């Protein structure tokens, strides 16, 4: 008998359920309850793969949407806080730096400078001042720069550098030197060119340096006199004379250096250096407030990062348990498969 | 050895058939499958009843998107039979009986119209081999459906079927020679 014959015989003799069994199954089927219209079980039996296909994008969408909503909400609260900070800062700045008025020379300057800064005219001092004033617009920058130059000249000073830029956000940077005796006047009048944004005066004492230079100069002069007197003696031998002449040259050279240094120190003490910066409000404004979109994106990104961190933490904690469960499931499946093979091998 | 091509188009089934109709339609299939698997008609009858009781309990869980009524019932029948085999193996181990397998002292296990040689040949096959013969040849399931039911690949189904038919053929040939 060949396979086709076998198949023919097998299909021709298909087993049919005995009548008794058929009756028994009919009895079982008769127990079927009337269909429940509100049965929810089939609805709960969702395929895992389809759930995953829907759940993963849904979870990602929810995460992104929640980040967007939170970012939007937090951008509002943040900008409110930022504005409050700026208002507070401006208020404190206004209190700290009131508009100076010309004519109240020392008083106004001292008030702006906080602790009294007053040059001591009987001592040599290096005086440096840095001023930043704010004017209303770019034209104001040019006007203020020109006034500063005129003022410097009128006070007997001179300009070291001047850099004036005009445009939407014009600014000017000037470095001028004025006589120390008139530095307070200069500071007050320069401060009056606009609203003071910042002001700093530095005084370094040069008198000690000057005293040291003068003392050394006196010493060198006396040494030169002594050496010159000895050289006038005709009984000196050639070697001693040569040594004394060499010593005299060194002393004279040192004296020249000391005179130069003294003159430079005196010059430094005579003139004060003032760095003046004139700006428009846009340049000095606080950190620009980012746009609402930028703030929302930043906050949303922060929320997303936190969501990612939380998800990662959960994954790290859950991963070992998930692996154990997977291993148990796989082991059970393999065991049952082997058992079935063994049972069906008989 | 001959190739067996028994592919049939999948039947579309009405979505809301009553359980009684489904049971009536597929009773012979379930019984035939269990008979081939157990080679014992009395046991096959018991397991068939048990299968339909289980099926009735699970009836509302049936999802037509995942397969036909027949495949669903045969899967329950297989599970029921395997449970019985396991219980029987445990019982035999407890009783320390050396004899293994299903009691098969009956004559004409698979039907009185079968030749004695074919009946003997089928009884000589393993349960796994008889199972695949029942599903692919007798019940006319396609390779894919059978593979899904048995939890193996289509190739494995084909291999197992050819081996079973080969053994049957050889056995019948030996009987003819004798």
Image (cartoon, rainbow, N blue to C red):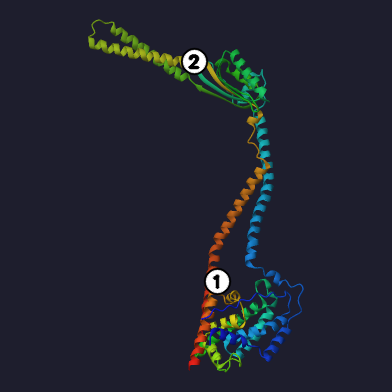
Q: Residue A268 has which mark?
A: none
Precedes in sequence: disc 2 or disc 1: 2
What residue is rendered at 26% in x and 11% in y?
A242
Report helix, strand or loop for mark 2: helix
Q: Nearer the viewer, residue A97 or B37?
A: B37
Q: Nearer the viewer, residue A223 or A337?
A: A337
What is the distance, in whole Å, between disc 2 and disc 1 at their CAs?
93 Å
Rendered location of residue A179, percent (x, y): 55, 15
Q: Nearer the viewer, mark 2 or mark 1?
A: 1
Pointer 2 with pointer 1, Cβ within 8 A:
no
Q: Is residue A123 visible?
A: no
- Residue holding disc 1: A329
Q: Nearer the viewer, residue A281 or A48?
A: A48
What residue is rendered at 65% in x and 68% in y?
A47
Are there few (<14), some (14-19), or many (20+) residues within 10 Å of tag 1?
few
- Please state the chain letter of the residue tagged with numbered disc 2 in the rendered image: A
Q: Residue A267 has which mark?
A: 2
Are there few (<14), some (14-19), or many (20+) residues within 10 Å of tag 2?
some
Q: Is residue B144 left or right of residue A101?
A: left
Q: Is residue A286 visible?
A: yes
What residue is rendered at 70% in x and 89% in y?
A23
Rendered location of residue B47, percent (x, y): 62, 86
Q: Are marks 2 and 1 on the same chain?
A: yes
Q: Is residue B109 left or right of residue A33?
A: left
Rendered location of residue A294, percent (x, y): 65, 43
């Amino acid at each position: 008998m060949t396979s086709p014959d076998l198949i023919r015989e097998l299909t021709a003799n298909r087993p049919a359920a005995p009548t008794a069994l058929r009756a028994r199954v009919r009895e079982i089927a008769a127990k079927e309850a009337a269909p429940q219209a509100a049965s929810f079980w089939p609805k709960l039996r969702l395929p895992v793969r389809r759930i995953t296909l829907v759940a993963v994008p849904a979870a990602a969408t929810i995460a992104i949407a929640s980040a967007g909503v939170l970012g939007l909400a937090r951008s509002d609260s943040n900008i409110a806080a930022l504005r409050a900070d700026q208002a507070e800062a401006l208020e404190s700045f206004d209190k700290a730096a009131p508009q100076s008025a010309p004519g109240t020379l020392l008083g106004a300057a001292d008030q702006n400078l906080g602790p009294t800064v007053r040059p001591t005219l009987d001592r040599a001092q290096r005086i440096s001042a840095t001023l930043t004033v704010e004017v209303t617009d770019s034209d104001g920058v040019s006007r203020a720069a020109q006034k500063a130059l005129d003022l410097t000249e009128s006070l007997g000073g001179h300009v070291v550098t001047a850099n004036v830029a005009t445009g939407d956000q014009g600014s000017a940077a000037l470095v001028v030197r004025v006589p120390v005796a008139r530095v307070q006047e200069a500071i007050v009048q320069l401060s009056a060119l606009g609203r003071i944004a910042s002001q700093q005066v530095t005084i370094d004492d040069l008198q000690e340096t000057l005293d040291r230079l003068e003392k050394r100069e006196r010493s060198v002069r006396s040494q030169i006199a002594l050496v010159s007197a000895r050289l006038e003696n005709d009984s000196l031998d050639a070697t001693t004379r040569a040594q004394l002449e060499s010593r005299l040259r060194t002393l004279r050279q040192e004296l020249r250096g000391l005179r130069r240094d003294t003159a430079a120190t005196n010059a430094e003490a005579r003139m004060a250096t003032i760095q003046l910066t004139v700006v428009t409000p846009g340049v000095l404004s606080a950190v620009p407030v980012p746009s609402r979109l930028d703030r929302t994106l930043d906050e949303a990104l922060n929320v997303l990062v936190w969501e990612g961190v939380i998800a990662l933490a959960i994954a790290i904690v859950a991963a070992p348990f998930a692996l154990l469960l997977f291993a148990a499931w796989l082991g059970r499946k393999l065991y049952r498969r082997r058992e079935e093979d063994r049972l069906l091998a008989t | 050895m001959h190739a067996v091509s028994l592919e049939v188009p999948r039947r579309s089934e009405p979505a809301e058939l009553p359980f009684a109709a489904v049971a009536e339609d597929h009773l012979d299939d379930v019984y035939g499958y269990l008979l081939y698997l157990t080679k014992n008609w009395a046991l096959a009858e018991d397991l068939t009843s048990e299968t339909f009781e289980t099926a009735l309990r699970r009836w509302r869980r049936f999802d037509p998107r995942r397969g036909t009524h027949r495949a669903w019932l045969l899967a329950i029948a297989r599970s029921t039979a395997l449970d019985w085999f396991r219980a029987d193996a445990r019982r035999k181990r407890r009783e320390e009986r050396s004899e293994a397998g299903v009691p098969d002292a009956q004559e004409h296990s698979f039907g009185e119209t079968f030749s004695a040689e074919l009946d003997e040949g089928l009884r000589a096959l393993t349960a796994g081999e008889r199972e695949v013969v029942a599903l692919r040849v007798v019940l006319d399931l396609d390779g894919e459906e059978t593979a899904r039911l048995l939890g193996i690949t289509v190739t494995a189904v084909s291999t197992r079927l050819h081996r079973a038919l080969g053994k049957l053929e050889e056995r019948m040939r030996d009987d003819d020679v004798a």
